[in-house]
């Protein structure tokens, strides 16, 4: 795997550490199993007093399963997570730990802003104060540029998804976002993080004549938010997209910005859920770009299943490519028809376990394991019942530790081509694309700005 991901071979197998970890995991799981078995015997013994043994065995099993489900999913654990999530000190430097607010009126969180600076949280503050400003964009393009509009509403800014969505819309209106050429509605990751590798290049492409808005729905890492806060992201994305889309449709078609939906990881799942294509028939958005969509995403799964015969699961082709396309490093768009009125693009790495995990892999090999291995996937991976699912689950836990361009580590250069396809920047050339990719390969870990937008 390391060789296929361009890494140096490992010097040490860490055999002792692996054995110790395996032993600890075994003891923990054995202990959990022993506790569950003891609980079952305890319940069954009580039922023996009032009913026949066979009936008591069945009822005891049902009771244990229900209790475990309630405790782990909808009971104590869910309550504990909600308490942690609503404790606003949850690693986000909220309130008294926040740095001084910006003084520029165009930055959310300033004195003129409708959005609270302290309540925004660190991911939001980093987003609204980061990225290229007009001077940086103009230096790159050689043309006069605008300061991009960035709006972010933190979870702590309002109590309900609808209230947060209304606040985001009001801030967009205050900043004149609907006078820009491009408006991007983004659903962030579970923690509220926004990948600068996606947003910085887009602002260069459109010479700053662009507005981007996002609303936070959780403080948890995406895998935990996916498992334990399934509804929060979906509800917030639905409220945000419907609120802003409804306002956008009231504007004259020739005087409003082009509207796009975007999301990475859990943000892709929630924004796909909230983008109901049937509601867009009369007044469609201009497009959508989803990166690293998690495997439960219903819309993504439907598209995957509808792929053209003979095209691989990890990089399919759908129809003639006039509505939906997939992007991947090193791939071209040969054989596609011209784009239609709405453009939908997916970016997914073949080695991304967040995308290609299969909940049924305990019983049968996933589709992609029956095909030649994709970029970054070991050719020695073989299906083993039960074992494969544990392997893929562990890969998910470590997916962001992969080098940039593999696993779930998406980075700027790979966002650029899809954004160009979806948003069609004016007067953009192949040479501009190469210059932007070089600019975004300037040593910065994320994004492609030579500095931050100043808050003063």
Image (cartoon, helix red, strand yellow):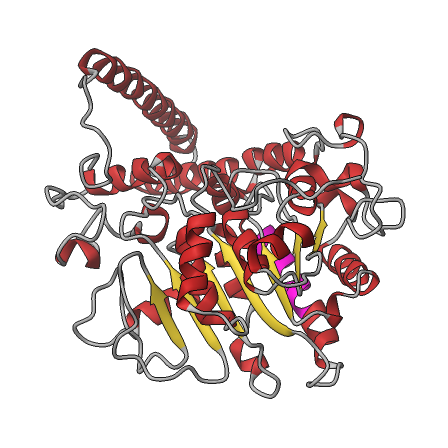
Is 238 in the magenta?
yes
**Residue 353 x, y percent position in the rendering:** 32, 46
Q: Nearer the viewer, residue 49 or 176?
A: 176
Residue under the image location 56 percent in, 86 percent down: 281
Whether residue 190 is visible = yes
- Measuring 43% from the left and 47% from the top, which residue is drawn there? 411
Residue 181, horizontal then vertical, whole percent: 66, 72
The quarter of the picture where the C terminus appears is top right
Residue at image location 52% in from the left, 46% down from the top = 448
**Which percent across, then down, holds residue 122?**
67, 36
Q: Residue furthest right?
A: 112
Q: Nearer the viewer, residue 43 or 189?
A: 189
Q: Is residue 261 left or right of residue 294?
A: right
In depth, the one of 155 and 60 nearer the eye is: 155
Residue at the far bottom: name it.
282
Q: Indicate whether 135 appears above or below 332.
A: above
Quarter of image, res 110:
top right
**In which quadrant will I find the N terminus?**
top left
At x 37% / y 48%, what residue is drawn?
Answer: 354
Q: What count of labels does the image hold?
A: 0
Q: Is residue 20 above or below residue 181?
A: above
* Image position, residue 364 (x, y; %): 17, 53
- In the shown orientation, is residue 232 left or right of residue 49? right
Q: Is residue 451 left or right of residue 49?
A: right
- Which image quadrant for residue 429? bottom left
- Does the image show residue 133? no
In the current view of this chain or complex, which residue is farthest to the front? Answer: 142
Q: Is residue 6 magenta?
A: no
Question: Magenta part mainly helix, strand or loop?
Answer: helix
Q: Is residue 81 above or below residue 192?
A: above
Q: Which residues are magenta?
A: 231-242
């Amino acid at each position: 795997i390391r060789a296929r991901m361009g890494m140096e071979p490992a010097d040490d197998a860490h055999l002792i550490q692996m054995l110790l970890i395996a032993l600890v995991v075994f003891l923990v799981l054995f202990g959990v199993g022993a506790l569950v078995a003891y609980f079952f015997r305890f319940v069954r013994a009580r039922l023996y007093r009032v009913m026949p043994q066979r009936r008591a065995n069945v009822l005891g099993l049902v009771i244990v399963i229900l209790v475990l489900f309630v405790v782990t999913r909808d009971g104590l654990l869910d309550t504990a997570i909600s308490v942690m999530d609503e404790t606003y000190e949850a690693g986000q430097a909220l309130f008294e730990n926040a740095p001084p607010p910006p003084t520029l009126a165009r930055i959310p969180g300033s004195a003129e802003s409708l959005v609270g600076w302290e309540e925004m949280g660190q991911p939001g503050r980093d987003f609204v104060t980061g990225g290229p400003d007009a001077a940086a964009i103009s230096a790159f393009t050689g043309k006069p540029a605008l300061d991009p509009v960035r709006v972010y509403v933190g979870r702590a800014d309002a109590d309900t998804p609808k209230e947060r969505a209304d606040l985001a819309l009001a801030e967009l209106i205050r900043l004149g976002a609907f006078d820009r050429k491009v408006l991007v509605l983004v659903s962030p990751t579970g923690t509220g993080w926004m990948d600068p590798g996606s947003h910085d290049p887009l602002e260069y492409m459109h010479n700053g004549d662009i507005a981007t808005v996002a609303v936070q729905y959780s403080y948890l890492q995406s895998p935990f938010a996916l498992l334990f806060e399934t509804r929060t992201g979906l509800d917030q994305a639905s409220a945000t997209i419907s609120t802003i889309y409804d306002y956008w449709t009231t504007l004259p078609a020739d005087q409003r910005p082009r509207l796009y939906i975007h999301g990475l990881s859990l943000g892709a799942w929630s924004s796909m859920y909230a983008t109901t294509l049937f509601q867009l028939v009369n007044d469609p958005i201009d497009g959508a770009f989803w990166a690293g969509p998690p495997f439960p995403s219903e819309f993504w799964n439907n598209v995957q299943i509808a792929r053209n015969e003979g095209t691989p699961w990890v990089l399919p082709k759908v129809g003639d490519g006039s509505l939906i396309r997939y992007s991947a490093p090193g791939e071209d768009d040969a054989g596609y028809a011209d784009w239609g009125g709405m453009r939908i693009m997916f970016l997914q790495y073949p080695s991304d376990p967040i995308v290609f995990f299969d909940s049924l892999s305990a019983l049968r090999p996933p589709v992609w394991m029956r095909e030649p291995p994709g970029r970054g996937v070991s050719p020695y991976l073989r299906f083993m019942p039960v074992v494969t699912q544990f392997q893929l689950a562990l890969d998910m836990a470590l997916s962001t530790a992969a080098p940039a361009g593999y696993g779930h580590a998406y980075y700027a250069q790979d966002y650029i081509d899809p954004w160009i396809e979806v948003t069609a920047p004016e007067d953009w050339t192949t040479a501009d694309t190469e210059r932007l990719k070089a600019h975004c390969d300037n040593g910065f870990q994320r994004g492609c700005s030579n500095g931050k937008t100043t808050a003063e």
